[in-house]
Image: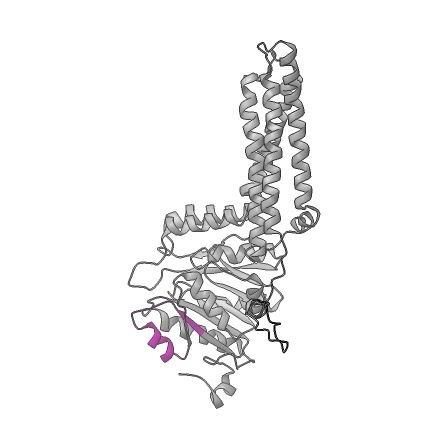
Amino acid sequence: MIVQGEQLKKNKVLAGGGPGFNEVEITFVLPCLNERDTLAHCIAQARSVIYELGVPGEVVVADNGSTDGSQEIALRMGARLVDAPIRGYGAALIYGCRVASGSTIVMADADASYNLREAIPMVEKVRQGYDLVVGTRLRGKILPGAMPWKNRYIGNPVLTGTLNFLFRSGLSDAHCGMRAFRREAFERMDLRCTGMEFASEMIVKATLLGMQRAEVPITYAPDGRNRPSHLRPWRDGWRHLRFLLLYSPSWLYMIPGILLFLLGISLNTFLNLIPESAYITLGSLFFGTHWTVPATLSAVFGLQIIFLGLISLLYSVQRGLYPQPAWFERFSKRISLELGLLVGVILILAGSAVEGVILVKWIRSSFGALAEFRLAMFGLMWIMLGTECMLNSFVLGLLNQQVETIPAEIRIQQHQPVEKRSEETIPSGMG
C-alpha cells in the first residue's frame, strides 16, 4: 500500500515514492535477504517513526536475492523495493542509499534486533548538524541472548579498538547496524565495500573526511529470525581487520618502514665508527661485526616498505579509495622522478666510494686478506638503497604521470585510410 493523496496530506508520510518526490526528508533503508519473519514488523515500525516525526518519508527495502517471499511483503507494506544484484550486506545498503530520496537516511537491519523508535534521537542529531550518527549498543542496553559472547567481549571491542587506534574515530561501537546520516555525507564517502566491512568503511571514511560524528545509546535485542544469522564472526572479523589495515598505510607501511630504515642505518653507522675488533653492548645485548648483515637488511627492507606505502597510497588516492592526506599532497608536488633518480645516483656513488676505499686498501696490501667486512657491508647498503630509490621512483613516476588521452573518435579518424585523388595525370614513363 502506498500512502498518497488525502492520506499523505493528513499524516505527511510518504511510504513509497521515488526520486520525483523532492519533499522527502527521511528515508529508512532496510537491507533484506530472506527476512520474511521480521520484515513487515520493521517496515511498520519505520513508518510509525516517520509518522511520529511528522515529516515526509519513505521506506526502502534493498533486497539481496531473497527466495522466501520477502519482496512481496515489502510491496504489500508499501515500501519501495530495490534489487541489489551484488550479494553482500554492504552492497545492499549502497544500492538502497543510492535510490533514497530523503535528505536524511536511516539504515537498520531488517531482523527486528533494533528498536527503530530509537532512531528518533539519531535523526535529531543529524538535524543539529552531524554528518553521521551511530548507535552504540555497548553504552546502551544489550538484552540477554542478543549478542554472542565472542562478539561482545572479543570481536567488537578488538575491532572497534583497532579502528579507534588507527583512525581516532572516538566511537565506542563501530559495528552497530543502526545509523543515521545526511545524504550528502553518504555521497561524499563514496563507499565501496560490499560485505560486512561496509560498517567499518563508513566510519573510517567519515573520520578521514573530517565529518562530524556522534553516538546515541540504543537497545539491542535478540533477532526475530527462524534461521541462522548471515554473520560469520571469524570470516567477517578478518574482513574488517583486513580493511582497517589496507586503509591505514601509515601503520601498515610507513611507520614500520621508517623504524626499520632508521634502525638499520643507525646500527650500521655506529658499528663503522668503532674499530673492527670492537663491539657495542646494550645491557646484555652484544652487537659485533655479524650485526652489520641484519642492519643492512633492516635498512633495505625498511626503505622498500616505505616505497610500498607511497605506491599504495598514490594508487588508492587516484582510484578514489582513500582521501588524499594533506601531507601527501605536498609530498607529491615536491617529489619527481628526476629527484628520485638524482638521490639514487648520489647514494650509489657514495656506496661505491666506500667500496673503492676497500679496493684501494686491498691493492695496497698486495691483494692480501682484509678485515673490512663492516665497511664492505656499509658501502653495499648505500648501493642497494640507491638502486631501490631509482627503481621505485620509476614506479611512482608511472603512477603519477598525467597523460592527456586523445578521444576515441579522433583516434579512429586518425587511423582511417584516406583516399587522395589528383586531377593531374601521371606522365608517361613514370610509375
**Residue 275 visible to an observer of this rendering:** no
Q: Which residues are magenta?
A: 60-78
Q: How far across and down, in percent of the image, does residue 151 sit? A: 40, 50
- Above or below for 424 versus 360: below
Q: How far across and down, in percent of the image, does residue 419 sit? A: 57, 73
Tell me what residue is drawn at x 63 percent, y 26 percent.
Answer: 266
Taking the magenta stretch, the answer to whether it contains residue 269 is no
**Residue 328 visible to an observer of this rendering:** yes
Tell me what residue is drawn at x 62 percent, y 48 percent.
Answer: 397
Tell me what residue is drawn at x 63 percent, y 78 percent.
Answer: 423
Q: How far across and down, in percent of the image, does residue 341 sit? A: 66, 40
For this rendering, which residue is in front, 408 or 228? 408
Q: How far across and down, in percent of the image, does residue 213 sit? A: 58, 59
Direction from residue 262 to residue 224 in the image, left or right: left
Direction from residue 208 to residue 151 in the image, left or right: left
Taking the magenta stretch, the answer to whether it contains residue 61 is yes
- Above or below for 79 versus 231: below
Tell me what residue is drawn at x 40 percent, y 64 percent.
Answer: 86
